[in-house]
Amino acid sequence: MSISLEQAQEIIAVAQAHGRTAGWNPLSVVVLDAGGHPIAFARPDGASPGRFEIARAKAYGAVMLGMAGRAQMARAEAQPYFIGAVNGAFGGQVLPVPGGVLVRDGAGRVIGAVGVTGDTSDNDAEAALAGIAAAGMTGEA
Amino acid sequence: MSISLEQAQEIIAVAQAHGRTAGWNPLSVVVLDAGGHPIAFARPDGASPGRFEIARAKAYGAVMLGMAGRAQMARAEAQPYFIGAVNGAFGGQVLPVPGGVLVRDGAGRVIGAVGVTGDTSDNDAEAALAGIAAAGMTGEA
Amino acid sequence: MSISLEQAQEIIAVAQAHGRTAGWNPLSVVVLDAGGHPIAFARPDGASPGRFEIARAKAYGAVMLGMAGRAQMARAEAQPYFIGAVNGAFGGQVLPVPGGVLVRDGAGRVIGAVGVTGDTSDNDAEAALAGIAAAGMTGEA
Amino acid sequence: MSISLEQAQEIIAVAQAHGRTAGWNPLSVVVLDAGGHPIAFARPDGASPGRFEIARAKAYGAVMLGMAGRAQMARAEAQPYFIGAVNGAFGGQVLPVPGGVLVRDGAGRVIGAVGVTGDTSDNDAEAALAGIAAAGMTGEA
């Protein structure tokens, strides 16, 4: 099973609407497949220009390490050199904070990840989870 | 004037529908702003995983050089080392073929670019132009 | 609205004069547009050769993250691995200290950033603010 | 002897005025010192955002190789792999076409280079020579 473009676009739309309803800063959202490659992305009007890189780096680390943003952050707090070295191995494309959320299918397999950026890292993660749930999948933040 | 997320999503939807109607391979489409930064992207089911990088490199070169894909290709044919060296200066992010299409506002100013990949370069460019026209802007392929 | 070359050159001239009047070390100043691309730069006689890279990295991070140097520094103090990872995502071009100053238009929109380097980070930021104010815009340090 | 900031700014102003008088596209101009490091840069309103990288790569190759743009282009035409390999050694920052102009002092020593981009390569070089001559130095295109 994989994330379709239609599902990715629903994840993005629901995550962004979740933030708007809550009154948060505009959220940029990327959905990556099980290989860490972009399926869909959207950056709202008024968001800063670098949001694609940030969103992707949150989601990319989650897919490539099989570890959601919160777990990556715990590891970064405990062993900063570990995440530094991981970034060497992955070309600097891993951002270890909440907002990088794993997407699992019904059998628990990782089928991709969602990266959200724009508000606090915790709010970013909450918006990602809302989008993933609306698309009928399970998120792990 | 700049391209809104809503306009970018319309460009993508129309470009992809243009290809489906014509019976082409699935088209991946990115819309960049006037600084070369992604606003929106969509990769259809069945497209190969590297399509984001290809779409972005087509559009990125167009924005950064102020030169659409067809003009870049003519320069690359005449002076291969020129485009090779340009790619060094821009971190390898310039793909000089049709499908990188400049977007101009009513006054003729470049406000972004669209990158399409998936079918022939000429068809990619045609789909981009269809999307840009539907959003009420002027494309230069 | 965007920063014209004339405005950028005024920002640079006033920022450098501010430092000279105060008796500071010579200040190098870059002005970037809303996409993080250089409009103008000047490095005074006697400044060290690497000043362009430092000035640009201060301003570039501000534009790309939509966060001025002081806020970046606070984040770097709290989460060093976050700024380390951000730098991976942006090719090592983010220098998170004061002296990277956002430029806003009358409506509060970010239209670019100024990067100043040469004296203390706080003095660098003060000079940037002086230049931005002289050009009739609002700076956020 | 070295190029002062005042001289660099005169080179830029005269080169840009030369192009305006001739009715050319807006010219972006960088002046590098004898170590290949930027002293000053200016990009006119309406020029595409990537002009700094192009201008610098023209001038950088000239300084680092001690070879002006025209000679670099002849070498690139004769031995494309040579310039490709040079770019590997210099991080992709060498653009071997006219518009990268060496600056020499009265004794013939290279004290920097000027990079101009925006119109044809030949016109870019002519504008650089005009600026360098106005500042009382000798250019080699």
Image (tube, coloured by chain):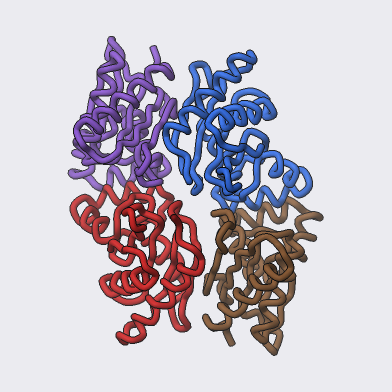
Chain colours: A purple, B blue, C red, D brown
Identity of the residue drawn at 42% across and 16% down:
A4
Taking C125 as reference, is B130 left or right? right
Q: Specify whether residue B54 is in view.
A: no
- Whether C12 is drawn above or below B7: the answer is below
- Whether D127 is drawn above or below B79: the answer is below
Give whichever of D17, B42 is nearer the camera. D17
Identity of the residue drawn at 30% across and 38% down:
A26
Give whichever of B11, D126 is nearer the camera. B11
Identity of the residue drawn at 24% across and 47% down:
A80
x, y (%) of residue B23?
Answer: 63, 13
Q: Within the image, what quadrant is residue C63 found in?
A: bottom left
Identity of the residue drawn at 38% across and 27% down:
A31
- Image quarter hosting the N terminus of chain D: bottom right
Taking B26 as reference, is A3 left or right? left
- Image quarter hosting the C terminus of chain D: bottom right
- Whether C40 is drawn above or below A132: the answer is below
x, y (%) of residue D27?
Answer: 64, 64
Q: Specify whether residue C131 is in view.
A: yes
Taking C74 as reference, is A89 left or right? right
Q: Within the image, what quadrant is residue D34 found in?
A: bottom right
x, y (%) of residue A91?
Answer: 42, 43
Furthest residue toward front: B106
